[in-house]
Structures are given as structure tokens and as C-alpha cells.
Image (cartoon, rainbow, N blue to C red):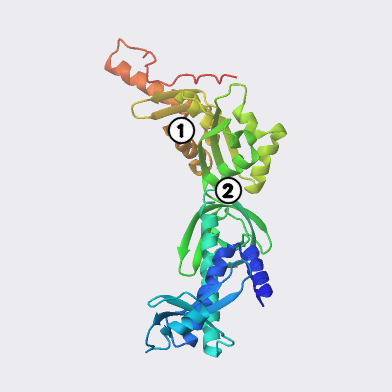
């Protein structure tokens, strides 16, 4: 019996990831509850499991007295010395109990306690394991979808991926292997729940960390990342090592690194730009893939006016203003975009207004706040 018990405990420890000591403690507590129930709830009934041999010993603790009044709690000096020589009055003696059968009720109690404690121990192990993985990517297999939530098998437990946290238009099927970002781990009455997402910008950041060794090693740093899930992501990167091209490192040879990430994101476009402290150059780069002709900035209000070619206007603004919105989030500047024709018309109106106010001024010189040519990228 003891060999089978040890084997079962070792097997459960391996399969569930629960420490062997915790399993023994749980089993000991459950059997103790059953033993005390068998003997009318007496608190002096105790139980011990040997951690090496798994031998179970049940005993009752009695106090040595001169005249025994309560046989359940007390023992005479002669009987005590027969069990363990050298005992004296008022000392405690452990009297072995030969427990052959706990009985149906006691056995049922032991079973319930064992299952309950095992579930609690398993939940604790799962929570401790996954709470340290918050902010990382995990792979899981889609098991089912219920009420707009995908349930993924992530090994020892299931994780939840709300459909709104999956990519737009993404329809996951049972058996699909999916990578997702662990956003949170919460304790609920039913146990720990692992919440996943594929729309968080940090999901893309972690994908780059996994694909680009220079980022994992800290040689290339992602300064900022903004995202419109399923549509476009913009990343600003830089490197303290002048010998390393941060953009080239992220793109990879023939685009292999960034292409694998794009495939994971179901074709989402990714713009990678080199970070700079010059706001003009940074804004110009952030509006990629559009080309910028002129940029004027107001550093106090952190606003910028950008002039682009008429053919580049829709590209600079993007679908539903997506490109310029992401550029503003990436740079932290409020950006206003004008086409070349709009800018020329505006300047003409300003000149005419100035001429009417002061006829001596037929032409207005370029002011310090007017847009200027963006600084050329140092390449």
C-alpha cells in the first residue's frame, strides 16, 4: 500500500506541477479529518505520514496521570512505561491506533477533503506560475468558443481570449495554435483566470523581442510603439551602438524578421522608423510612408504644421485619419497636414491681407513660424 501511495503522489506531483511536500501535507490533513471523524471528533487523535516511505501512522495523545478518569484523554503511569519506558506524571504519550477501516462516512470525508485541497493546491501553483508571465507571449491551442470568448489550452490550464481582443476579422477554429499576450491573471472563486490579448501594442513589442536578438540583448531599444490592431503599427527604434542599424536589425535580411511578425498579425502593416530627438525629422519619419515637403513647429504648444505634395495628402492622412493619428501618438505632437496647393492658397491669402493692411508690404517674408524643409535623414 505504501509503495502504491508513494507512486501515486510522485505521479500527481509531475502531472500537476504541485510540490510533493504539498501533496503529502494535503493528504495528511484529509486523512486526519477522517480519523477524527471516526473517533467522534476527538482533537487528541493525530496522524502522520512519513515523507520517505509514505507509511501512515495514527495515534492518540494522552496525558500520564495517577488515577485515570477519562480513558480517551488520560493514561496510567504503568501503561505509559509499557509503551515508552522513562515516562513520568503530566507528560504526554503517543498511543498507536490500529485503524483498519475509517467507515463509509469517514472515507467520504477524506475523499472530499483530498479533492478540495488538491484543487486549491493546483490553483495556487497555476496562479504563481502565470502571474510571473504577465507581459509575455504564450502559445495555446483553441479548444472552443463560448459567448464571444475563445478558450485556449496553455498546458496545465485554460486561458481566455475575448473575441474583441483577437485581430479584426480573425476567426479562430478549434485546434488552431495561437500566440497571445498575457495581459492579466486574476483569482476568481472558480480559480485563477488567465486573460489574453492580441490587440495590445505590447504584443507586437514582445514579438519583436522574440524575433530580433538585438532587442532581446538590449542593443536595439524600442523607444515607442503605437498600433491600430489589424491595420498598422508604428515603431520608433534606436541604438546606442553606432555600428548597429536599428531599423535594419528589426527588418532582418531580406525582411525575414519583420515578415514573420506580419504573418502572425495577419498582414498588419508595420512602419519601423529610427528615433531622433529632432522633432522635425521625427515627425517627418512618423508620417511614413508619405513624403513630407515642409514642416513648421511650435515647441511651446507641441504643435506642427506639415506640408505635403497634393498626391501624398491622402497617404499622409491615411484611411480615416489613421496614419496621422498614429504619428501623433508616436511623437507626442499635434500634427496638422496641408497639401501644397492648400498651403500656397493660404500664403497667398495672408499676403493679400497684409498688403491691404499695409500697401507698402507687397510681399511678406518667411516668418520663423513658417514651415521649413525637414532635416535630411543622416544616412
Is residue 90 visible to us here?
Answer: yes
Find numbered disc 2 in the image and state the secondary structure of the residue it sits on: loop
Is residue 113 visible to us here?
Answer: no
The residue at the far left in this view is: 357
Query: 52 or 286: which is nearer to us?
Result: 52
Query: 106 or 178: which is nearer to us?
Result: 106
Neighbour class for label 1 at 10 Å: few (<14), some, many (≥20)? many
Q: Position of residue 230 (x, y in %)?
A: 58, 48
Q: Position of residue 353 (x, y in %)?
A: 32, 21
Query: 35 or 245: which is nearer to us?
Result: 35
Find numbered disc 1 in the image and state the secondary structure of the residue it sits on: helix
Residue marked by disc 2: 230
Q: Is residue 236 above or below residue 176?
A: above
- In the rendered image, the quadrant that contains the C terminus is top right
Q: Position of residue 4 (x, y in %)?
A: 68, 74
The span from disc 1 to disc 2 (Cα, nearest Å) is 21 Å
Query: 5 or 302: which is nearer to us?
Result: 5
Q: Residue at (65%, 70%) from the top-left corner?
A: 6
In the picture, measured across the screen, residue 83 lies left or right of residue 6, that is left
Whichever of callouts 1 and 2 sits on the residue coming sooner in the sequence is 2
Q: Position of residue 122 (x, y in %)?
A: 55, 66
Q: Which numbered circle lies on residue 331?
A: 1
The residue at the far right in this view is: 254
Q: Is residue 244 above or below residue 140?
A: above
Tell me whether the residue at label 1 lies in contact with that at label 2, contact meaning CB atoms closer than 8 angstroms: no
Amino acid at each position: 500500500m505504501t509503495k502504491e501511495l508513494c507512486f501515486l503522489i510522485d505521479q500527481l506531483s509531475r502531472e500537476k506541477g504541485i510540490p510533493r511536500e504539498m501533496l503529502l501535507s494535503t493528504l495528511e490533513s484529509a486523512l486526519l479529518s477522517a480519523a477524527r471523524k471516526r473517533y467522534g471528533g476527538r482533537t487528541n487523535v493525530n496522524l502522520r505520514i512519513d515523507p520517505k516511505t509514505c507509511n501512515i501512522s495514527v495515534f492518540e495523545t494522552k496525558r500520564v496521570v495517577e488515577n485515570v478518569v477519562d480513558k480517551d484523554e488520560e493514561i496510567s503511569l504503568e501503561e505509559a512505561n509499557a509503551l515508552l519506558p522513562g515516562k513520568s506524571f503530566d507528560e504526554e504519550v503517543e498511543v498507536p491506533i490500529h485503524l483498519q477501516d475509517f467507515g463509509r462516512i469517514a472515507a467520504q470525508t477524506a475523499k472530499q477533503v483530498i479533492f478540495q485541497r488538491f484543487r486549491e493546491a493546483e490553483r495556487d501553483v497555476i496562479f504563481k506560475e502565470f502571474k510571473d508571465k504577465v507581459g509575455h507571449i504564450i502559445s495555446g491551442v483553441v479548444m472552443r468558443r463560448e459567448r464571444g470568448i475563445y478558450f485556449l489550452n496553455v498546458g496545465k490550464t485554460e486561458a481566455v481570449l475575448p473575441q474583441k481582443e483577437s485581430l479584426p476579422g480573425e476567426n479562430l477554429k478549434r485546434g488552431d495554435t495561437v500566440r497571445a499576450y498575457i495581459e492579466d491573471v486574476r483569482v476568481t472563486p472558480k480559480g485563477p483566470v488567465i486573460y489574453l490579448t492580441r490587440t495590445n501594442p505590447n504584443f507586437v513589442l514582445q514579438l519583436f523581442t522574440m524575433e530580433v536578438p538585438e532587442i532581446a540583448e538590449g542593443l536595439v531599444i524600442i523607444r515607442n510603439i503605437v498600433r491600430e490592431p489589424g491595420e498598422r503599427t508604428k515603431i520608433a527604434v534606436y541604438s546606442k551602438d553606432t555600428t548597429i542599424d536599428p531599423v535594419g536589425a528589426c527588418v532582418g535580411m531580406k525582411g525575414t524578421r519583420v515578415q514573420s511578425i506580419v504573418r502572425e498579425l495577419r498582414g498588419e502593416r508595420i512602419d519601423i522608423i529610427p528615433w531622433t530627438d529632432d522633432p522635425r525629422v521625427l515627425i517627418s519619419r512618423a508620417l511614413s510612408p508619405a513624403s513630407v515637403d515642409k514642416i513648421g513647429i511650435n515647441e511651446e504648444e507641441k504643435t506642427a504644421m506639415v506640408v505635403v505634395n497634393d498626391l501624398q495628402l491622402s497617404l499622409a492622412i491615411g484611411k480615416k485619419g489613421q496614419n496621422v493619428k498614429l504619428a501623433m501618438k508616436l511623437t507626442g505632437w499635434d500634427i496638422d497636414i496641408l497639401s501644397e496647393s492648400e498651403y500656397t492658397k493660404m500664403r497667398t491669402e495672408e499676403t493679400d491681407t497684409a498688403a491691404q493692411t499695409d500697401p507698402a508690404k507687397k510681399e511678406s517674408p518667411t516668418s520663423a513660424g513658417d514651415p521649413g524643409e525637414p532635416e535630411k535623414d543622416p544616412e
